[in-house]
Amino acid sequence: MVLLPKLASFAKAYPEVVLDVVTLNEPADLIAGQFDAGIHIGEFIQRDMIAVRVSKDLRFAVVGSTEYFKSHDVPREPRDLNDHPCIRIRLGAGPYRWEFKKAGKVVTVHVQGPVVFDDVNLTVQAALNGVGLGLVLEEQVAELIMRHRLIRVLEDWCPPFPGFFLYYPSRRNQPAALAALINALRLS
């Protein structure tokens, strides 16, 4: 994850502060979960939260293994994904619908496939093993693409979008550790 180096630096700078990190594939109810803050992709954050940008723009990448493409055609547009087994990712209550955009045209595809994961690492491993096509963040597979272990398709249908935001409820008495974390992670 793009934020790990910043979190590591924060932990070294503030050894008295314990960062209790919980990973979820959906926005957490901060109040009910008794969390000080969360980090998520901006579009999933509730409107009543204060949000601070903590990453650059991100892009999705649709990828498959070189072995996979020896026996399958390369999809040219999102609807072609209906002819491919896809490795789906669970966000919240159900599988994420793959969304694409090109020249102002938005296309949502309800992909089908043999597996649904809630972990991006499993998605990448399944793609590497030829299970099907996966949708992951570009930065998560950049090296595998560069090493020709994964092939990226539909790149022109995956525009950048605002990345991760740290979000927290409005509070008059913000904990000092949270203020320091916000300053450490804020995109400059």
Image (cartoon, rainbow, N blue to C red):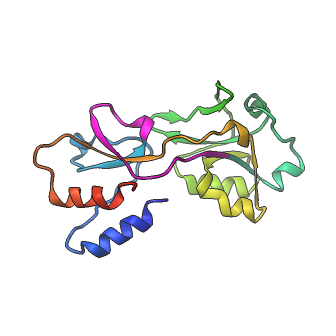
Residue in front for this viewpoint, 9 or 33: 9
At 36% from the left edge and 71% from the top edge, which residue is drawn?
A: 9
- Give the quarter of the image for residue 7: bottom left
Image height of 102 relative to 41, above or below: above
In depth, the one of 18 and 183 nearer the eye is 183
Residue 28 as seen in the image, left or right of residue 109: left
Q: Nearer the viewer, residue 49 or 73?
A: 49
Relative to 40, residue 124 above or below = below
Residue 79 counted in the magenta span: no
In percent of the image, x 74 and y 46: which residue is there?
132
Residue 18 appears at what percent x and percent y?
24, 67
Q: Position of residue 161 (x, y in %)?
A: 54, 40
Name which residue lies at 59% across and 46% down.
Answer: 59
Residue 103 occupies quadrant = top right
**What's the magenta region?**
42-61
In the visual, does 188 lie left or right of 152?
left
Residue sticking out furthest to the left? 173
Percent position of residue 111, x then y? 67, 33
For the image shown, how many numbered marks are present on the structure?
A: 0
Most extreme residue toward the front is 188
Quadrant where the C terminus is found in the figure: bottom left
Q: Looking at the picture, does residue 71 appear above or below residue 7?
A: above
**Which residue is painted at 76% across and 61% down in the image?**
149
Relative image position of residue 124 (x, y in whole percent): 64, 55
